[in-house]
Image: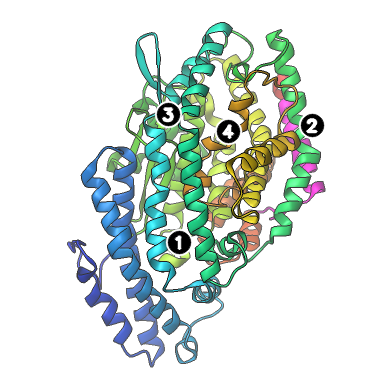
């Protein structure tokens, strides 16, 4: 499925903007007087965009796989500081040419309406004075990963990453869990001020970018930059309120159940990592090779085509899954538009969370394969509300075949129950992070102390009162510092909440008619970004909706499925 090059030399090396300049000049100077000329221009522009985007992707991937790799860091910084700023300026010129009336008359606006509206928004937001600031900002955003990659604690003579230590806690006795939890929390606090200082720097730069683009605040600017055409800031706030009303009480019930099953009083934060019933140790795979193999089988049993895609990723070496010191935190799937594949990055340590993470990122990868036939890169580059629908749906759909990971029926039921509890419990966290980011950008110049208090106020709304943080108030006050998105992808998080609701709806359809649900899921993903978000959701047979009544309906369904598992 690799992109055939008709415009860019396949062996082109990008050492500086000069290597790309002839291609951009060609596109700027080419006559666009006929439909044929415009279509060829669009195809060549897309080919160049895909090639350049993938070149940058590999630079980013290498820096996250090894944050100590100075050559990779240099290559990344060269791109963002020297090459990308010049691309941004010429891209704005190409964008404005695309929007010219004499070019637009040759465009099929019904097929390219999402591309046209995105181009109009990009033209509205672009300011040349922001180009060097954005380059500096992109480099600064990488500092968070570098800081976190060096966080380790020593357990029984072994240095462990935060991910590895968290996995260790799942099976440790309660007093040992407490000790490790305190070690982890205190280690994070060592970098608290450093992370706050970094965020102050990022907030100031983002505020300048917004002001230069004639916006009162970065929240409104970023809303436009993210292409949120199909909902408003008020819709996000309505989502926050609905989660507080409907979902937070359910999470309270879940943790009361945990407290009872564990026979502890009070329930402490280090009790939340333990698999229930006590003594259960869910270890779905021995190593990452086994993780990939079993995941491919899950996908295959859902749909033969989906299984092929995951196997292809493995054969192409597009996976870096193990946790290690010096590796950036988190996980991601990076679509590679030129080669029409993806790269999956994560920090696996052998637990169920890792298994679900690969299902999630694998859903993103499947999405990239399914929309590869879209003719232009712009139509493959889906908004997060659609991208996360692909991944979060895969988490739930794949449960039908988790027997590949859990041969024991009891463990399989426990794994599914844990997943459904997580599906519910993550929604208040998503609302918290989004609400917190609204505070960050609506209150420019706030102090770290005010930021901490704002987070604690949000915790009172969306946190779980059953969990006792006495003595760990500092850990709780800085819990938000774990969330990578705040630093690297600002205001990108509520999409997970919207997509989670969509994923539950797709899974509900799957329980009723598996074959039709999978067919509609694939049909929706094949659309890429050739339709609006509500239209793509409709193609999947669901609604793009986040009202209180809709959320209540979906939560009732999940709770009913949980009861079935408990009764079996």
Q: How far apart, in angstroms, are the residues tagged by discs 1 and 2?
A: 39 Å
Q: Secondary structure at mark 1?
A: helix
Q: How far apart, in angstroms, are the residues tagged by discs 2 and 3?
A: 35 Å
Magenta span dominant secondary structure: helix
Name the residue that disc number 4 marks.
478
Residue 368 highlighted magenta (yes or no)? no
Labels 4 and 2 touching (C-beta < 8 A): no
Q: Position of residue 374 (x, y in %)?
A: 44, 65
The disc at residue 294 is 3
Q: How far apart, in angstroms, are the residues tagged by discs 4 and 1?
A: 37 Å
Q: Earlier in the sequence, mark 4 or mark 1?
A: 1
Q: Earlier in the sequence, mark 3 or mark 1?
A: 3
Question: Marks 3 and 1: which is nearer the front?
Answer: 1
Residue 220, by quadrant, is bottom right
> In the image, is 546 to the left or to the right of 437?
right
Name the residue that disc number 1 marks.
380
Q: Earlier in the sequence, mark 1 or mark 2?
A: 2
Q: How far apart, in angstroms, are the residues tagged by discs 3 and 1?
A: 28 Å
Q: Earlier in the sequence, mark 3 or mark 4?
A: 3
Q: Nearer the viewer, residue 525 or 322?
A: 322
């Amino acid at each position: 499925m690799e992109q055939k090059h008709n415009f860019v030399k396949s062996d082109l090396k990008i050492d500086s903007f000069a290597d790309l300049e002839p291609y951009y000049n060609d596109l700027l100077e080419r006559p666009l007087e006929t439909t044929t000329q415009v279509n060829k221009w669009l195809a060549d522009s897309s080919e160049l965009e895909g090639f350049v985007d993938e070149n940058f992707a590999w630079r980013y991937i290498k820096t996250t796989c090894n944050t100590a790799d100075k050559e990779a860091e240099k290559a990344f910084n060269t791109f963002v500081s020297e090459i990308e700023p010049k691309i941004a300026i010429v891209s704005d010129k190409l964008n404005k040419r695309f929007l010219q009336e004499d070019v637009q008359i040759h465009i099929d606006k019904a097929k390219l309406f999402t591309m046209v509206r995105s181009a109009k928004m990009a033209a509205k937001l672009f300011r040349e004075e922001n180009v060097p600031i954005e380059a500096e900002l992109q480099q600064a955003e990488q500092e968070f990963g570098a800081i976190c990659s060096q966080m380790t604690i020593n357990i029984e003579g072994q240095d462990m990453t935060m991910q590895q230590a968290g996995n260790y806690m799942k099976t440790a006795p309660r007093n040992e869990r407490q000790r490790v939890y305190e070690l982890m929390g205190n280690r994070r606090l060592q970098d608290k001020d450093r992370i706050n200082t970094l965020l102050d720097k990022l907030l100031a730069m983002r505020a300048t970018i917004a002001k230069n683009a004639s916006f009162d605040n970065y929240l409104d600017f970023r809303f436009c930059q993210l292409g949120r055409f199909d909902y408003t800031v008020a819709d996000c706030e309505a989502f926050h309120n609905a989660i507080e009303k409907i979902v937070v009480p359910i999470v309270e019930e879940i943790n009361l159940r945990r407290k009872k099953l564990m026979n502890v009083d009070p329930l402490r934060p280090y009790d939340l990592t333990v698999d229930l019933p006590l003594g259960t140790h869910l270890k779905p795979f021995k190593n990452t090779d086994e993780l990939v193999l079993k995941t491919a089988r899950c996908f295959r049993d859902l749909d033969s085509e989906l299984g092929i895609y995951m196997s292809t990723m493995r054969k192409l070496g597009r996976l870096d899954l193990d946790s290690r010191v010096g590796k950036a935190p988190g996980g991601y799937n990076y679509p590679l538009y030129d080669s029409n594949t993806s790269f999956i990055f994560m920090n696996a340590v052998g637990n169920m969370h890792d298994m679900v993470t690969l299902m999630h990122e694998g859903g993103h990868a499947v999405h990239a394969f399914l929309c590869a036939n879209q003719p232009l890169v712009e139509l493959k580059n889906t908004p997060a509300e659609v991208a996360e629908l692909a991944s979060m749906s895969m988490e739930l759909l794949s449960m039908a075949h988790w027997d590949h990971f859990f041969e024991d029926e009891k463990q399989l039921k426990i794994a599914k129950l844990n997943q459904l509890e997580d599906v519910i419990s993550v929604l208040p966290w998503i609302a918290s992070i989004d609400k917190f980011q609204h505070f960050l950008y609506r209150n420019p110049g706030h102090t770290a102390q005010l930021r901490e208090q704002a987070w604690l106020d949000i915790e009172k709304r969306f946190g779980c009162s059953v969990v006792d943080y006495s003595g760990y108030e500092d850990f709780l006050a800085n819990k938000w510092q774990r969330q990578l998105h705040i630093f690297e992808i600002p205001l990108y998080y509520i999409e997970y909440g919207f997509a989670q609701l969509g994923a539950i709806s797709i899974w509900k359809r799957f329980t009723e008619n598996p074959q039709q649900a999978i067919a509609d899921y694939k049909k929706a993903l094949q659309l890429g970004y050739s339709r609006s978000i509500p239209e793509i959701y409709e193609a999947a047979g669901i609604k793009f909706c986040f009202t209180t009544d809709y959320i209540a309906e979906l939560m009732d369904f999940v709770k009913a499925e949980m009861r079935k598992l408990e009764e079996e």
